[in-house]
Image (cartoon, grey):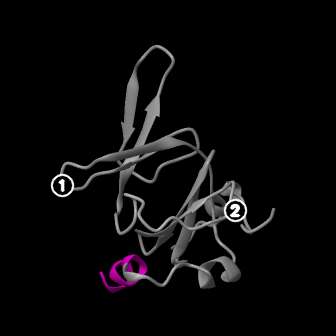
Amino acid sequence: MGALESTAGDLNDYGGHDRRRHRVYVTRNTEYHFRDGFCVAVRDRRTGDFLQGHLALRRRIHGGIRFYMNGAIMPNSGDPEPGEAIYFEANGRDLVTSPLERVERPTKEVVSAYPTGKSAKAAATK
């Protein structure tokens, strides 16, 4: 499975309180890496490079949005699920991603490779 170690099904099989701090939302071109609900890294899937200036950095997810072929839009105020776009809201600069392919957990190696710039530090201190 490469750099990511579990599948979306693994996230839903456990019935107790989820104590894990990291989650990765995977779209066709991008991985959005979260720690404690804040986006701490965004990675281009084609190159594997972390993107330093992405609008999602330091933001919290506000939900998911599912788009239908007939033009309908269905918001989800909970955690986005595969098939839904991630919706970030922040001071008039809202961001909607492409639809999610899956939600996974990063390996320890990927977490240790997160950029250590001010974006990651700011998210970790909130």
Query: Whole-Å distance between the Cαs marked 1 and 2?
Result: 34 Å
Q: Is residue 24 visible?
A: yes
At 34% from the left and 64% from the top, the residue drawn is 59
Q: Residues within 10 Å of mark 2 (few under 14, many from 20)?
A: few
Q: Quadrant of residue 24?
A: bottom right
Q: Nearer the viewer, residue 77 or 28?
A: 28
Q: Is residue 61 magenta?
A: no
Pointer 2 residue = 10
Q: Nearer the viewer, residue 33 or 84?
A: 33
Identify the image quadrant of the C terminus: bottom left
Q: Position of residue 102 (x, y in %)?
A: 64, 51
Secondary structure mostly taken by the magenta-highlighted segment of the chain: helix
Sooner in the amino-acid sequence: mark 1 or mark 2: 2
Q: Nearer the viewer, residue 53 or 60?
A: 53
Q: Which residues are magenta?
A: 119-126
- Give, as a three-letter code, the residue at label 2: Asp
Q: Position of residue 106 (x, y in %)?
A: 65, 71
Pointer 1 residue = 91
Q: Is residue 22 above or below residue 71?
A: below
Q: Position of residue 78 (x, y in %)?
A: 40, 51
Q: Of helix, strand and loop, which one carries label 2?
A: helix
- Give, as a three-letter code, the residue at label 1: Asn
Q: Is residue 94 left or right of residue 108?
A: left
Q: Is residue 123 magenta?
A: yes
Task: Tell which tag, 1 or 2, sits nearer the viewer.
Answer: 1
Q: Residues within 10 Å of mark 1 (few under 14, many from 20)?
A: few
At 69% from the left and 82% from the top, the residue drawn is 109
Q: Is residue 26 visible?
A: no
Q: Position of residue 97 (x, y in %)?
A: 46, 45
Q: Of helix, strand and loop, which one carries label 1?
A: loop
Q: Nearer the viewer, residue 42 or 70?
A: 42
At 64% from the left and 68% from the top, the residue drawn is 105
